[in-house]
Image (cartoon, rainbow, N blue to C red):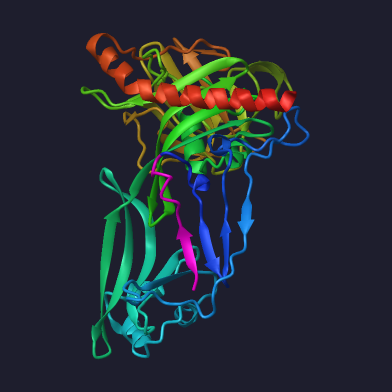
Amino acid sequence: MFIKGTQNPSFRAGTHPAHLRTPVYLRNGLVFVALGLFLAAAALAVVSPNDTVTELPLIHAARQNIALPTPFPAPAGGFDQPFISETQIRAGDTLSALLQRLHIQEPELQQFLAHDKNARAIYKLQPGRTLQAALDQKGDLVWLRYNHTPGTHEGDRYVSRWLEIKPAGAGRFIAAERSTAADRQIRMAEGIITSSLFGATDAAGVPDAITLQMTDILGSKIDFMQDLRRGDRFRIVYEAYSHDGAEVGTGRILALDFINRTHDYEAVWFDPAQGPGGYYDFSGHSLKGAFLRTALKFTRISSTFGMRMHPLHRTWTGHMGVDYAAPSGTPIHSTSDGTVEFIGQQNGYGNVIIIRHDQHYSTLYAHQSRFAAGLKRGEHVTQGELIGYVGMTGWATGPHLHYEFRIDNHPVDPLSASLPMAHTLEGPERATFERAAAGYKEQIHLLADLQSQRIQIAQR
């Protein structure tokens, strides 16, 4: 008998990360219990041994062998719950092989799956997805589930969907699609940058989807391509969703604290009574700057603003923008809300888009391989919206984005220009925000204290 994924009931949903839960495995008469003795610090980033901060043994494991009688005795009243087994779909798997791994002995089942229109989805096997089977004490099938959509958004809910097959007697079966709302949990984590942002978040157990949100939220404050330094720190509180004990997706970041070059940047989600929700610092200032620092998620600067030797014409000339080297096809995003003033080909710019933001500000995006589908002159775009893709049209020696930031139609250096800020909460709205943000502020402070203690211990 093999019991998989049993969780310690003392860990309530939403109070500890998934990797702090205590799994219990019962196999071949041995019980293995992974016991986290330093629970609060388990989400800390793993620090490279070459760094000045050394790695600490935060998690300790206890292993105990318990002799069980053979055969294992059944309860006096018999088993009234089915045995549930699970297998993960691998590349090249066939449905027949999966049913064998689940020990399903139903001769008519595979024929039913092949011909019933409601069950045919099970043949679209996706590697990484799972099949589960429940068998009674006689080994007969109670139900079979294909978890084809572990988690997805449906309106304002996050749900899990699966195909369920049940016996209907006399060798017959019925198949139906099922769904249920996933369980919402709150996760906390913190980490230190040693090599890259993704390396630090991976070490802290933070999903990539949350990492990308982090760059979006602080995009008007931090240039994540140029500004990150070794030793930068983050503390984060975010939503996660699970179903049957397995994580199936992530929601939004609820609170974030990022220390970059000694500058402390905060963010907390707030959904006001009037208007859409957004991110603010703990003082109530909106983090939605009027402009993002960059139009690409991750790249490198290949040419800065100012005088340079032109790579094609070999003449000393002024460069009125910043070039970002990136592979062809890299998505380009508008750095601010505005209206498309020009879209098309223009001399050495190749495929170019010019966006007018107000009477003073405009931006230009050149050398694109193609534009976003349906985008046309006069159309309104929002900050962060996809407008095109990196290419090398026009005067270009390689794929890159040429980006210009203009004030009153005069190009200025976007890397050093003072960018205007947006809304600040005031009056009753500010009071409501402070009440909503108080709990998140405490969680961020807790993570900061744990991080400081860990570093102090390591430096002794």
In the image, 280 versus 137, the foreground residue is 137
The magenta-colored residue range is 1-14
User: Would residue 276 appear left or right of 195 to someone viewing this image?
Assistant: left
In the image, 419 versus 177, the foreground residue is 177
Q: Quadrant of the C terminus?
A: top right
* Residue 217 at least partly seen: yes
User: Quick check: 34 above or below 229?
Assistant: below
In the image, 241 versus 362, the foreground residue is 241
Residue at (30, 27) in percent of width and height? 277
Q: Position of residue 90 (x, y in %)?
A: 53, 69
User: Quick check: 391 above or below 348?
Assistant: below
Q: How many marks?
A: 0
Q: Position of residue 118 (x, y in %)?
A: 27, 74
In the image, 155 versus 362, the foreground residue is 155
Residue at (73, 24) in percent of width and height? 459
Residue at (35, 35) in percent of width and height? 376
* Residue 302 at least partly seen: no
- Residue 249 falls inside the magenta stretch: no
Which of the 4 image quarters holds residue 176? bottom left
User: Quick check: 183 above or below 307?
Assistant: below
- Residue 6 falls inside the magenta stretch: yes
Q: Position of residue 248 (x, y in %)?
A: 41, 52
Which of the 4 image quarters holds residue 442? top left
**Residue ranking furthest to the right:** 50
The overriding secondary structure of the stretch rendered in magenta is loop
